[in-house]
Amino acid sequence: MIYTLRHRTTYRYARPVRFARCSLRLKPQDGEGQTVLASAVTIEPSPANAVTRRDYFGIEALGIRLDTPHAEFVVEANSRVAVDRPAPPEPEAGPTWNAVRDAVLASRDLSGAAPVHFLFPSARVPLVPEVTDYARASFRAGRSAYGAAHDLMRRIRADFRFDSSATAVDTPLAEAFRLRAGVCQDFAHVMIAGLRGMGLPAAYVSGYLRTTPPPGRPRLQGADASHAWVAVWCGSGWLGLDPTNDCAVGNDHIVVARGRDYGDVAPIDGIVTASGRQRLRVEVDVIPEDEAVPELALAI
């Protein structure tokens, strides 16, 4: 499947911003069943400086500096991505979770891709005893790593309520777990904490999910959303699981970045020098190739 992606972010400020420094993580990743065919980012106002870099985990980020006073900041990312992933394995396939845990701990690999980096607590995903206890019910003796993770995903989807008003971007994991409510970020963080608590490396994945409009209804421009899910290390590679939707990751998911938690992969973060309130508007389109697409600015 080939997708055209549009992600437009608009900040409006009550008073002019005189200086800003930001990191943008908006380009989809190549690899693991994805190929980026074209990608471009437009920024208004035009930055005084822009540098592309990769962090230790391989996430590509565009660092920009704005030193022109502005009351509005607009970033639009347009991409065209081909996605062709193999079918996910059967839920109980693969080595046992105990064997995967022991192999990760015994490994000497400390490269950026090493699963051991995704085993320990991170800034937004501490190890919470209550979450570990909740996850333990999925980890019976002799069960495969993927089977245990798959079962935990299904339980979270059954036990938690999707509620965009229950949490905010900075709500602590323990609070989201207590509420049994939140959004995809919360579902992913809770699942990652549970997996790490049981000794399995787990990563936070940001990206997009294809959505389908109701029968007979047109796609509403800008009505899609960015999404988050979990990648679990199962001994020989990463496998994606989406606890918000209770499904294995397939060709409807488009990966932008993978990190230890949301803090590693936030689409836009940084600092601004200003006072007063700001308003944020985010518009996302995920358009399959068999649908008509608007004219977008794309570059190889």
Image (tube, rainbow, N blue to C red):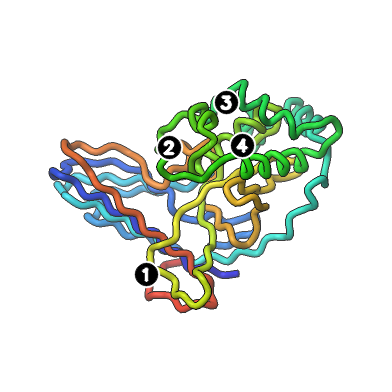
Q: Earlier in the sequence, mark 4 or mark 2?
A: 2
Quarter of the figure with residue 166:
top left
Give the number of the mark in front: 4 or 3: 4
Q: Is residue 111 left or right of residue 286?
A: right
Front disc: 1 or 2: 2
Q: Report the residue at 41% width, 60% height from top.
A: 284
Q: Where is residue 239 shown, x and y percent of the image?
A: 69, 47
What distance separates the C-alpha of mark 1 from that of mark 2? Answer: 35 Å
Residue 57 shows up from this direction:
no
Identify the secondary structure beneath mark 1: loop
Distance from disc 4 to disc 2, alpha carbons, whole Å, reads: 16 Å
Amino acid carrying label 3: it is Pro
> Within 10 angstroms of label 4, few (less than 14), some, or many (20 or more) residues?
many
Which mark sits nearer the N-terminus, 4 or 3? 3
At 43% from the left and 53% from the top, the residue drawn is 26
| Label 4 to label 3: alpha-carbon separation | 13 Å
Graded by Cα atoms within 10 Å as few (under 14), some (14 to 19) or many (20 or more), the crowding at tag 2 reads some
Q: Give the image location of residue 297, x and y in percent.
A: 37, 69
In the structure shown, which secondary structural element does the residue marked by tag 4 occupy? helix
Image position, residue 70 (x, y; %): 16, 49
Q: Residue at x 24, y 55 (%)?
A: 46
Residue visible at 80% across and 30% down in the picture: 98
Q: Nearer the viewer, mark 3 or mark 2?
A: 2
Residue 167 bears which disc, if any? 2
**Mark 1: few, some, or many residues within 10 Å (few <14, many ≥20)?**
some
